[in-house]
Image (cartoon, rainbow, N blue to C red):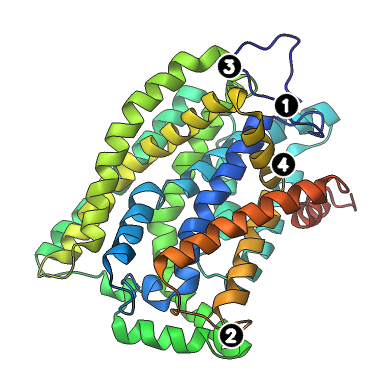
Amino acid sequence: MLQGKHRGPGAAVPVSGEPAGRIAAVDALRGFALLGIVVVNIAYLASGYRMAGLAEPRFSAPLDWEVRWTVTVLFENKFYLLFSFLFGYSFTLQIDSAARSGKAFVPRFLRRLAGLLLLGVAHAVLLFPGDILVTYSVVGLVLLAARRLSPRAAMACALALTALLAMGLLLLSALALLGADASGTVAGGAAEAARTDRALGGPATAIIAEHMHELGKIVILRVLFQGPAVLAACLVGLAVGRHRALADVSGHTAVLGRIQRVGFPVGLAGALLYAHSTWSGGGVHHGAYHMAGQAVDLLTAPLLAAAYAATLLRLLPRAPRLTGALVPPGRMALSNYLGQSLICSMVFTGYGLGLVDRLSPLTVVAIAVGIFLFQSGYSRLWLSRHRYGPAEWLLRWLTNARRP
């Protein structure tokens, strides 16, 4: 439940059955982030071509391209940032929880990171090499070292990290113009995508071997780019968490409005440029253009993600049904994140139906939305009988070194 006796018109709405100490707005934002994450991730789980950075050649109708552009503009690189922001915000809540219970925070948090690492490795090897839990387990160590940063210092570090990453991508873009284009070493080509499709449609041993192969290719992206971007978003969450801004948003409506007014136009403009750099086709300088587009997106995607969050936070008090639909999957975010990959693997790989690269982009997105709707209903049912989701229960066991 939210703390405080009085709630203004902009206060977050508590949900029936919400445990004491939980903040409905945080769980609702997590649920919203889960929807965006499955819409993005499912494309990579459904197609070896998307994993290789290419459009599926079987689907080239105008509607197919419209769906790709929509997902790239509105979803890609926005929702993992929102999830990372919430990781940083929840970090401050865990510090407070440890202080209230009189238990040492650092050993508990280190065990939690170890649990995330174990779950993430299993997830990456068995289900989805694009796993982000391993990244969180590493970034969490940096966050632990930076836990005493002031909000102002945390924001400054986040801005500096983002600027450095953008400069690095622009440097790679310039090098690509000079002939040193290394993008193919990560993305691969059509032949590599076809080989991935065959592997994913094969037996479990072939699927796992392909996941290991993909992990070997994308690890440099995790270390040099996504990891620092995740850390920057976590530091913003740390700064906002210091002010407990999400405990009651009624006092921050003016700030949320400013975030919307800046975030939507700037974020959408950057996302359109990024989408064009992704889908504009080949060409001599396509690699350089795509990296420049990624640099722009790196700077503007956080603004669009923030505008999404601000809009949802302002909407929740007026939409209790929306809050009720988003909070339960948000409370079980870890279980649902892993569950999304499991369901997609059963649909698209040789673990189950083997429909890799057989469904149109629109059908794939529809499946993603269906998965989220199923998880929303199932989470509400599960939490009516259990206090934690299954993965949350396991992680809590590892964190506290005793069975919940």
Residue found 45% across the figure and 75% down from its top: 359
Which amino acid is tagged 2?
Gly
Q: Residues within 10 Å of mark 2 (few under 14, many from 20)?
A: many
- Displayed quadrant of residue 336: bottom right
Work out whether residue 168 can be spotted: no
**SS under mark 4:** helix
**Residue 213's spot in the image, x, y percent?**
47, 81
Q: Which residue is mark 4?
A: 106
Q: Disc 4 and disc 2: Cα gap in Å?
A: 42 Å
Q: Disc 1 and disc 2: Cα gap in Å?
A: 42 Å
Q: Which mark lies nearer to you, 4 or 2? A: 2
Counting residues from the start of the chain, the first of labels 1 and 4 encountered is 1
Question: Is residue 324 left or right of 223 when viewed as pictured?
Answer: right
Which amino acid is tagged 3?
Gly
Q: Disc 3 and disc 2: Cα gap in Å?
A: 48 Å
Q: Residues within 10 Å of mark 1 (few under 14, many from 20)?
A: many
- Label placed on residue 10: 3
Q: Disc 1 and disc 4: Cα gap in Å?
A: 30 Å
**Residue 178's spot in the image, x, y percent?**
9, 65
Which amino acid is tagged 1?
Pro
**SS under mark 2:** loop
**SS under mark 3:** loop
Which amino acid is tagged 4?
Val
Q: Which mark lies nearer to you, 1 or 4? A: 1
Q: Which residue is mark 1?
A: 14
Q: Which residue is mark 2?
A: 350
